[in-house]
Image (tube, rainbow, N blue to C red):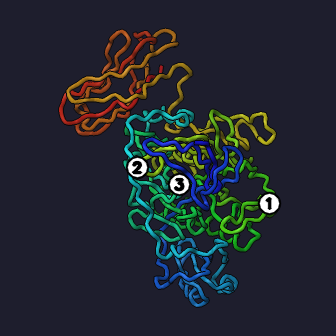
Amino acid sequence: MIPHISSRSRRTLALAATLGAALAFGAPGALAGTLPVGPSTAPAAKANAPAAAPASQSATWVAGTRAYLVITAPGDSSAVRSAIEANGGTVFSNFDAIGVIVAHSASSGFAATMRGVAGVQQVGATRTSDVPADAYTPALPANPAQAATPAGEPVRADMSQIKADQAWAVNPGSASVKVGILDTGMDDQHQDLAPNFDAADSVSCAYGKPDTRAGAWRDVDTHGTHVAGTIAAAKNGKGVVGVAPGVKIAAVRVAEPGNSFFFAENTICGFVWAGDHGFQVTNNSYYTDPWQFNCPDNIDQAAIIEGVKRAQEYAESKGSLQIAAAGNENYDLAHKTTDSASPNDSTPTTRTITNACLDIPTELPGVVTVAANGTGVTKASFSNYGQGVIDVAAPGSSVYSTVPGGGYGSKSGTSMATPHVVGVAALIASANPGITPAQLRAKLATQANDIACPSDSRCTGTTANNSFFGEGQVDALKAVGATPPPPGAYFENLADFAINDNATVESPIAVTGVTGNAPATLKVGVDIKHTYIGDLKVDLVAPDGTVYTLHNHTGGSADNIAQTYTVNASSEVANGTWKLRVNDNAASDTGTIDAWNLTF
C-alpha cells in the first residue's frame, strides 16, 4: 500500500502492511483522509482520562447541546455549578482541583449569561458542533479478534537509529515507570502490548468525563495502538520491540468514536487523570480540536488555552512530563501567519493568526515538542518546525508497530516520532528513580545528539539547537547512562536461541576489524528470558575456546538475566567467532537468549 498522512492525527499513516492481518488505516473526521507522504495538513491523534467530581446524573441529551469550559478559581465550585443549572445548563464533569467545569447547554445565550456570574473567570465553547448523544450513553469500543503473532522480532531501523537496540541490554526500562498514552485508545489484548498493559490506570476521557468501565479505553481507530507499540511493545520474541519494553503503559482514550476528535475537555480530563494516577510521562500525538491554533483574543479559544494549561500544570505538579507532537503541516511554528484548517468539526475558514495563537497542547509551557526525522538525520518532509518551539527530534517515517487485532503496520508522522521520545524519557526515568519533570525535560535535551542545519534557508539556529531538530535526535543508549561504543568496536547478535531443559545452546558473534587483543574491560551485554535463572550456567567462549563464566547457577527462582558483565579478555585475539553458551541443567523451566553484545 502507498504511504499516506492522516489529516487529523499527528502522524502520516503509511504502509498498512501487517503480520497476520491486512488492515486499512484511516477513519472519518479527526483521523480521516490519506495523502502522499510529504507536506500535509495533518494534525495529531487524541486520548483521554482524569478523575472528575460527579456530574449531574439527571442530564439527558437534547438536540443542539454544546459543550463549554467554565473557568473558576480552583477549589469549591458549588455556587458556580448551581448557577450553571439555573441558567439552562448541566454540569457534565467537574475538576475542582484546577477550577474547570465542563458544562452542556442547548441555550444560545448560555455562555454570555455565565460570564456575568460571580466567581466565573472565563467561559468558552469547546466545539462548533453539537455534543453527540453518545456522550450520555457511550458504547464500549469493540474488542477485536486477535491474529496470531508470528515468532521473531527483528530490530527495526527506527530503533537502531536512536540506539534503542543497544539500550535494551543495559536497561530495558523499569516496571515501576508508568507511561500514559493519551490517544485514540489501545488494543490491550495485542500480544505485544498485553504484557506491559496497566488496566487499573487506564480509562476513557472521551467527552471530558472519566469512564472507568473495563474496555472503555480500547482503540476507536488504530493510532493509539500503534503509538503504544513504539513506546513499550514487549521483548517477547514476537512482532516488534518498543523503545522501553520494560515499562508499564496505560491507555487514556481522549478521542471520540466515529470522528476521532480530541476536544479540549477530553484533554483536560486526560491530564488530570495522568497526574492523579502517577504517570511519569504522557504521549500526546494530537492537537486539541476543533482549532489547529487557539488564539487568546478569541473568547472561546482563550478559555480552551486556560483550561488545558491548568490541567497540564496540574499533571506536572504531580510528577508527570507531557511530550507532544509538533504536527505534520511542514509549517513554521515560530512564524505563524494563517490557519486554514479550523474549525475542523464544521466548516474551516482561512484566518490570519500570530505567534500568540497556540497549538494545544504542543506549545504550552513545560510540554516537550517533538519534530520528525526521516531515515538518518534528515528532517521529515511533513514535519512542522520552528526555532524555540522544537525541543528534540526522533524517527517518524515508515515506523512499523502494533495495530489492533494482533497485527502490525507502518505509519509516518510526528505522531510516530513522539513515542520514540516518550520511550527514551521512560528509560531516563527508569535509570533515575525520583526524577522530577523539570529534570527529565533537561536530560532529554542533554542526551540528544546534535544535528546541524542542512542547506535549507528555513533551518535557523546553531548545530546545538535549531528550528528543524531542536536539541537534536534522542539517544536511548545515552538515556540509560551508557557510553556509545566507538565505530567498529560494538558487535551484537539479536537472533533468538531457544534454551531447552537439560541442554546447551550457543549464540555466535563474528568479530572483525578490531586490531590486536580484546581489552581487559570487555563488556558483555546479556539479555536472557528464562524463569528460574538458578538453572542456568552462562559462559563467554573466546575464539580459541577459552571459557569465561558470567553466571553460574545463582539467582534461584528469579526470572531473566539482563546484565552487562566486564571480562578481562586481554589475552584473547579480538577477531574471530565469540560465543555465548547457556546450559540449562534442570527440568521444568525453559527460555530464550534474546540478544547479546560485545563492546571492545
Q: Which residue lies furthest to the bottom in this view?
A: 86
Tell us which disc is closer to us: 2 or 1: 2
The residue at 44%/20% (across/down) is 521
In the displayed structure, would residue 11 be above or below residue 132? above
Upstream in sequence: badge 2 or badge 1: 2
Q: What residue type is labelled 2?
A: His
Q: Which amino acid does label 3 sit on?
A: Thr
Of residues 277 and 304, the one drawn nearer to the viewer in this rendering? 304
The image quarter containing residue 105 is bottom right
Residue wearing tag 2: 190
The image quarter containing residue 349 is bottom right
The residue at 75%/38% (across/down) is 462
Task: Determine whether, in the image, residue 91 is placed left or right of residue 527.
Answer: right
Residue wearing tag 1: 354
Upstream in sequence: badge 3 or badge 2: 2
Task: Determine whether, in the image, residue 364 is placed left or right of residue 188.
Answer: right
Q: How many labels does the image show?
A: 3
In the displayed structure, would residue 294 be above or below residue 524? below
Disc 1 is placed on an element classified as: loop
Quick one: label 1, few (<14), some, or many (20+) residues within 10 Å? some
**Tags 3 and 2 touching, CB below 8 Å:** no
Disc 2 is placed on an element classified as: loop
Mark-to-mark CA distance, 3 and 2: 21 Å
Of residues 262 and 334, the one drawn nearer to the viewer in this rendering? 262
Mark-to-mark CA distance, 3 and 1: 28 Å
Rendered location of residue 509, percent (x, y): 42, 19
Residue wearing tag 3: 282
The image quarter containing residue 492 is top left
Upstream in sequence: badge 3 or badge 1: 3
